[in-house]
Image: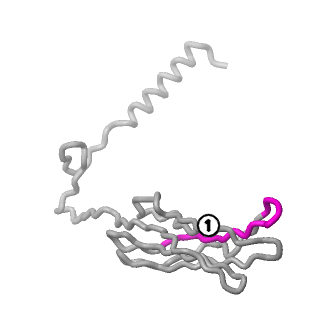
Amino acid sequence: MLRIPARKLVLALALLAVAGSAMPIAASAHEATSGTVRMSTAEGVNYSPPPQADLQVLPRGKRTEGGVTKFFFVIKNNGPSNAAPINAYKEAHAKAIVGSGFELQDAGYFVVPSLAPGATKAITVSCTPPAGFVCKQATTLTLNNSYDPNNGNNMATIN
């Protein structure tokens, strides 16, 4: 076991070793004001901001025919850039007529390959309730799309 003075000496040597290895490194970039680093065009490096595409999920209504309830949604690209790929999820809830049970129907993840600015993709969620259940609602949402600056409009539910 080391005595107190020996421990202090070891600690001091360790600190000196760390401090000596943390010397500043010079870089070849030109600094602009406000802390931004601008790359020299002579270096052939071009920076463009990542594309952004505001995706929006819009409810369009529902219709029941022959015991099947269909819920209609639209995924819209509000731009300004192309959106690709679009990760999304949809589900319908069949709720028990008696009690609090429910069953998910037509649930799952899907991908929309691409949407140009202003373009839309129609999404239909179907619900065929088993005996003792009724179709109550459906939801569609887009998720994990890093280029989307506004996640507040990425989900819609129809009751």
Q: Which part of the image, by quadrant, shows the C terminus?
A: bottom right
Residue at image point 49% right, 28% down? 14
Residue at image point 73% right, 70% down? 94
Would you place residue 13 above or below residue 158 in this image?
Answer: above
The residue where tag 1 is placed is 159
Determine the secondary structure under disc 1: loop
48 left or right of 61 in image:
left
Would you place residue 117 above or below residue 143 in this image?
Answer: below
Residue 94 is a magenta residue: yes
Residue at image point 54% right, 67% down? 141
Would you place residue 110 above or below residue 10 in this image?
Answer: below
Where does residue 133 sit, x and y in percent of width and height?
78, 71
Magenta-highlighted stretch: main secondary structure? Answer: strand
Residue 120 is a magenta residue: no
Where does residue 5 sit, x and y in percent of width and height?
55, 13
Report the span colored magenta: 86-101
What residue type is disc 1 on? Asn
Where does residue 77 sit, x and y in percent of width and height?
40, 72
Alpha-carbon neighbours of circle 1 within 10 Å: few (<14), some, or many (≥20)? Answer: few
Q: Residue furthest bottom?
A: 66
88 left or right of 96 in image:
left
* Towards the viewer: 38 or 94: 94
* Towards the viewer: 103 or 87: 103
Where does residue 153 sit, x and y in percent of width and height?
46, 61
Q: How is the image coloured?
A: one colour
Q: Which part of the image, by quadrant, shows the N terminus?
A: top right
